[in-house]
Image (cartoon, helix red, strand yellow):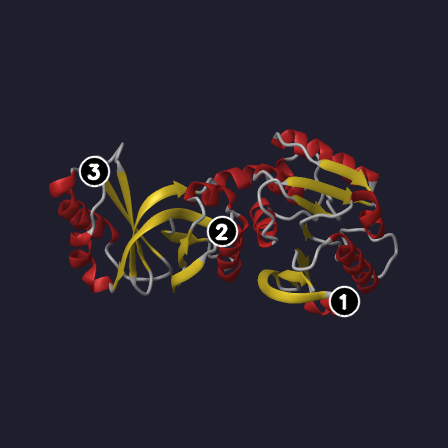
Amino acid sequence: MPVKLLLELSMECESLARAEALSAAAALGGKPRVIGEDTGVLMLETTADPSSLSSRLGLCHYVSELLASCDRDDIDSCVRDIDVPGPIRVRSTKVGETSVDLAGTSRRVGSVLGVSKGVDLHHPASDIRIIFSKKAHIGRMIRAIDRPSFEKRKNRFMPYVYPASLHPKYARALVNLTQVPSGGRILDPFCGTGAIVAEASLIGLHAIGTDLSGKMVEGSRKNLKHVGVDAELRVCDVSDIHRTLGRVRGIATDPPYGKSTSTNGEGIPALYARSFKAFSEVLDEGSRAAVVVPDKKLLEGADGFELVESHGLWVHRSLTRHFCVLSRA
């Protein structure tokens, strides 16, 4: 049966958070359909299991059952039609600079619902969340995303540290953009410190990491052990992945492009063109490669691929990371 979900999104890169949620639901076979959008909020109808979806997401704060949406001034009348198991607890939050009395709203809604349901602030049967954006959205919380766990897996806390490493929450989002289902084979051909491979393993994918540097591969192995996951790791040039690994369901990678990474003297455009040729040899038609690039012009050498979507994440004045999804044509 389809369920209607209310997702509270991370605002670091809202478009990327939305795309990750849709792709994660699709990877779970959930046939997601957007039924509403607001700043910081995404409403989906999907057959995906909500708990499974929650466990995959990196750029989301809460996943709730969608109960209602209304104009902000109509919140008091809107909640009178809500029927949930009691006792209840009500929490209100807002997106951006919206002017609203959050504490007062929680008390009023709690008093309305509490008459028939009862109130328990410590062990509620229904944890009601009210999100104020352009409109008001009401949900019954299913799961809070464990955001602190992503912070604990940042590269500086790992045994093998390297300057150029993708933050775990963005690595998770990149993995989800591939839409590889549970147990599917996913490859990072520039695995570096293993951040992408680790996130893929943590959500139950068959993760494979390759790198031209044996030092990087051993560093990845140490980091994966520290996180408590395992993956298939090999020293391999990107041009040899089809001979070494065979077919994979998806590719998620953050290729080298800066001063802190090494390409063994090869020019960046040439490396990317060679890489996309190799990607096309291991991916079936319609399979996805999710790639982080500093300049979308580098995708001009992606013969055999179609750009599905891209999301720019500003890092600093001279760097914007573009999270690009390409489909094997």
Residue shown at the point (70%, 49%) measured from the top left: 164
Q: Quadrant of residue 155?
A: top right
Q: Position of residue 9 (x, y in %)?
A: 44, 54
| Residue 215 makes an appearance in the image | yes
Label pair 1/2, CB-CB below 8 angstroms: no
In the shown orientation, is residue 150 left or right of residue 246?
A: left
Identified by mark 2, the residue type is Ala
User: Which is more toward the observer, 264 or 75?
Assistant: 75
Q: Quadrant of the C terminus?
A: bottom right
129 vs 271: above or below? above
Label pair 3/1, CB-CB below 8 angstroms: no
| Rendered image: mark on residue 303 | 1
Label pair 3/2, CB-CB below 8 angstroms: no
Instruction: Say whether disc 1 or disc 2 marks the residue closer to the N-terminus.
Output: 2
For disc 3, the marked residue is 86
For disc 2, the marked residue is 25
Identified by mark 3, the residue type is Gly
User: Which is more toward the observer, 103 or 119?
Assistant: 119
Q: Secondary structure at mark 3?
A: loop
55 vs 101: above or below? above
In the shown orientation, is residue 193 left or right of residue 52?
A: right
Q: Residues within 10 Å of mark 3 (few under 14, many from 20)?
A: some
